[in-house]
Amino acid sequence: MILGLDISTSITGVTVIDENGNCLYNEMWDTRNKKHFPNLYRKARFIKNKLLDVDDGFCIEKIYIEQSLQSFRSGFSSAKTLSTLSRFNGIVSWLCVETFEIEPEMIAASSARKKVGVKIQKGEKAKEKSFQFVLANEPSFVVEYTKNGNPKPGTMDKSDSWIIAKAGYINWKTKS
């Protein structure tokens, strides 16, 4: 089985896909509460426990993680944010090695989208297009909406992890 992760210091998206490409697990792990998760280490402990639950429930053979951003874009994340995200990505990657005894493979979000067939035109929002693609192609994908009709926090992280897991599945199938 394939484990796909979209790691963030606020919400981590998690998907497990079986050897036939079926989605068996698609969740988000919320670490936004500063009282419960005052630092990266508390967040990491929570993620570790969740990974142990996944390990108990599924026989994971491959792990794919969305590669953290490597460069600046005006109007986006600061150097401090990118550094923190990169640190947390490394911590969770190591937790995967410790938990599953499998070295995760990193996949760039743009490569993953392309591999699964998400077509992004110039000027379109990649995250939104990916979300719409998952909605159209994964019957088990559950979306909860706010009272204003917007997807609840974590929904995009769940869809991003599905894209990563599905791209990983395609990689795995082509190598097998």
Image (spheres, rainbow, N blue to C red):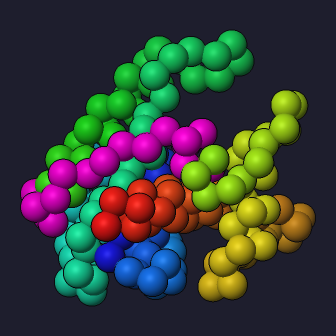
Asked if residue 18 is positioned above or below residue 7 in the image, the reply reads: below
Does residue 16 appear anywhere in the picture?
Answer: yes
Q: Position of residue 22 (x, y in %)?
A: 51, 83
Viewed as shown, does residue 108 lie left or right of 76?
left
The quadrant of the picture occupied by the N terminus is bottom left
Front residue (pair 137, 69): 137
Q: Residue at x 55, y 49 (%)?
A: 112
Q: Position of residue 75 (x, y in %)?
A: 71, 18
Q: Which contiguous range is marked in magenta?
A: 98-113
> Is residue 107 rendered magenta in the image?
yes
Count numbered badges in the picture: 0
Q: Residue at x 87, y 31 (%)?
A: 123
Q: Residue at x 64, y 16 (%)?
A: 73
Asked if residue 170 is positioned above or below residue 64 in the image, the reply reads: below
Q: Position of residue 144 (x, y in %)?
A: 72, 75
Front residue (pair 104, 173): 173
- The image quarter containing residue 142 is bottom right
Q: Residue at x 30, y 32 (%)?
A: 87
Q: Position of residue 11 (x, y in %)?
A: 49, 54
